[in-house]
């Protein structure tokens, strides 16, 4: 996809009043105007992506607080900011039935997924191979990135469930799959940059 083709339409909306009362009966509207139940699996899918976006914002705040002492963390802040936009693009498509998707409507693309792979590969070069699973924690940022990882996995599972009954852009599942892997790499990379030891899973520590 060329840079020109990558240009999406700007949002066409005006939020003047937050409440409309139209959702009081337990329904909401898709982008195409269709009314669906608020607990429909499609709503659960983009609602979970929205939840993930909120946790990414929380992690970014912790990251910005840490950058003052560890300037080497700064590149991750730019990555997470971009990811927030990509997640909103993902939600845009999930909130739209396949027949209503506009060619220039914002969406996640194969280029977005490939970029995550390149970034993971670059950050992994600084990390030691793992000999066990990693437990979340060690710093607030590390724990929040792990929360992002698990919420991302949940979003991926819900999108897979949705795809069994409705048309779902397959790039969404690929992107979320790769993004959850990226969050794992970012937890390790952030711990390395901060000099925070990782806590490895020890089955005997539960005894």
Image (cartoon, rainbow, N blue to C red):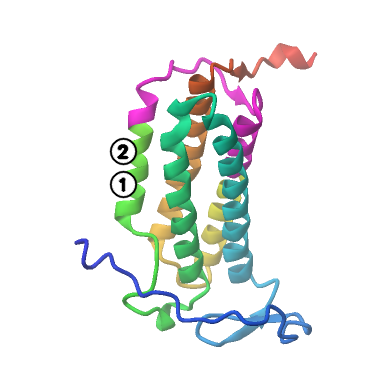
Would you say residue 191 sits in the magenta stretch? Answer: no
Circle 2 residue: 118
Residue 48 on image: x %, y % = 62, 58
Give the quadrant of residue 76. Answer: top left
**Quadrant including the N terminus:** bottom left
Disc assigned to residue 195: none
Residue 87 on image: x %, y % = 49, 57
Asked if labels 1 and 2 touch by Cβ distance under 8 angstroms, the answer is yes
Circle 1 residue: 114
Q: Which residues are magenta?
A: 122-149
Whether residue 204 is situated above or below residue 90 in the rendered picture: above
Residue 192 on image: x %, y % = 49, 20
Dot 1: what SS? helix
Give the quadrant of residue 10. Answer: bottom left
Whether residue 19 is situated above or below residue 177 in the rendered picture: below
What is the CA distance from the residue labelled 2 to the residue labelled 1?
6 Å
In this rendered view, identify the residue nearer to me: 193 or 197.
193
Whether residue 158 is situated above or below residue 166 in the rendered picture: above
């Amino acid at each position: 996809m060329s840079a020109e083709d990558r240009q999406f339409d700007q949002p066409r909306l005006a939020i003047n009043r937050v409440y409309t009362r139209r959702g009081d009966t337990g329904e909401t509207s898709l982008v195409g105007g269709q009314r669906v139940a608020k607990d429909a699996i499609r709503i659960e899918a983009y609602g979970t992506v929205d939840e993930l976006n909120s946790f990414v914002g929380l992690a970014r705040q912790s990251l910005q607080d840490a950058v003052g002492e560890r300037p080497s963390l700064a590149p991750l802040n730019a990555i997470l900011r971009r990811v927030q936009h990509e997640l909103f693009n993902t939600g845009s498509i999930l909130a739209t039935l396949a027949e209503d998707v506009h060619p220039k409507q914002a969406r996640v693309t194969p280029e977005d997924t490939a970029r995550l792979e390149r970034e993971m590969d670059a950050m992994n070069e600084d990390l030691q191979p793992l000999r066990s699973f990693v437990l979340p924690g060690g710093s607030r940022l590390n724990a929040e990135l792990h929360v992002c990882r698990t919420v991302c996995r949940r979003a991926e599972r819900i999108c897979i469930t949705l795809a069994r009954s409705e048309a779902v852009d397959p790039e969404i599942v690929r992107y979320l799959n790769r993004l959850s892997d990226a969050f794992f790499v970012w937890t390790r990379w952030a711990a390395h940059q901060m000099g925070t030891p990782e806590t490895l899973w020890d089955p005997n520590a539960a005894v």
